Image (cartoon, grey):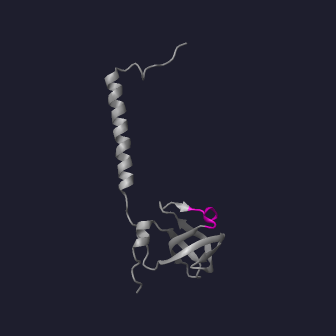
């Protein structure tokens, strides 16, 4: 049976060099990702509260019933969008912004670092 062994026909030193470069690049990526402890910029009109998704789009915000707007965006700790249905029953500390109708439209689930910071005072 004929198999292409072109990759393994290289001299061992070249293979070791390629493996070393690959390992170094992967380790470099890991340290860069782990070192990013940036605090996301929140709009000046953002408020802070404790949110529990009960039955989307119905939520509880600071213990009172509230509602997510149609098209509301919830961003997780990694700043990626989260579906409200995946957060049912979780007690989350969040920053949020309301739309002109008073519905919660933008939500950011806070990391420990962000939760420790105070929101800037509103004008």
Q: Furthest-right residue in view?
A: 55
Q: Is the N terminus in the top left, top right, bottom left or bottom right quadrant?
A: top right
88 vs 20, left or right, is right
- Magenta highlight on residue 88: yes
Residue 59 % position (x, y) = 63, 74
Residue 31 vertical placement versus 47 (above, below): above
Q: Is residue 96 visible in the rendered structure shown here?
A: yes
Identify which residue is drawn at 54% across, 62% down: 81
Between 26 and 6, the one nearer to me in the picture: 26
Image quadrant assignment for residue 40: bottom left
Give yes or no for residue 109 being in the magenta stretch.
Answer: no
* Residue 18: image location, x then y, percent: 35, 31
Image quadrant containing the C terminus: bottom left
**Left/right of residue 85 with respect to residue 20 in the rendered view:** right
Residue 40 visible, this orientation: no
In this view, the residue farthest toward the bottom is 123
Q: Residue at x 37, y 36 (%)?
A: 22
Q: Residue at x 56, y 79 (%)?
A: 62
Position of residue 38 relative to residue 30, above or below, is below
* Percent of width and height locating residue 121: 40, 83
Magenta part of the protein: which range? 82-89
Residue at image location 51% in from the left, 75% down from the top: 96
* Quarter of the rendering containing residue 8: top left
81 is higher (above) or lower (below) than 98: above
Q: Residue most toward the top?
A: 1
């Amino acid at each position: 049976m004929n198999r292409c062994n072109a990759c393994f026909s290289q001299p061992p030193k070249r293979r070791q060099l390629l493996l070393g470069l690959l390992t170094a690049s992967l380790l470099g990526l890991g340290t860069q990702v782990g070192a990013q402890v940036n605090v996301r910029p929140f709009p000046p009109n953002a408020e802070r509260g404790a949110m529990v998704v009960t039955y989307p789009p119905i939520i509880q915000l600071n213990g009172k019933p509230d509602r997510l707007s149609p098209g509301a965006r919830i961003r997780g700790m990694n700043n990626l969008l989260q579906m409200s249905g995946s957060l049912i029953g979780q007690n989350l500390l969040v920053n949020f912004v309301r739309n002109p109708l008073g519905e919660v439209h933008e939500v950011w689930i806070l990391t420990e670092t962000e939760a420790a910071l105070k929101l800037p005072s509103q004008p």
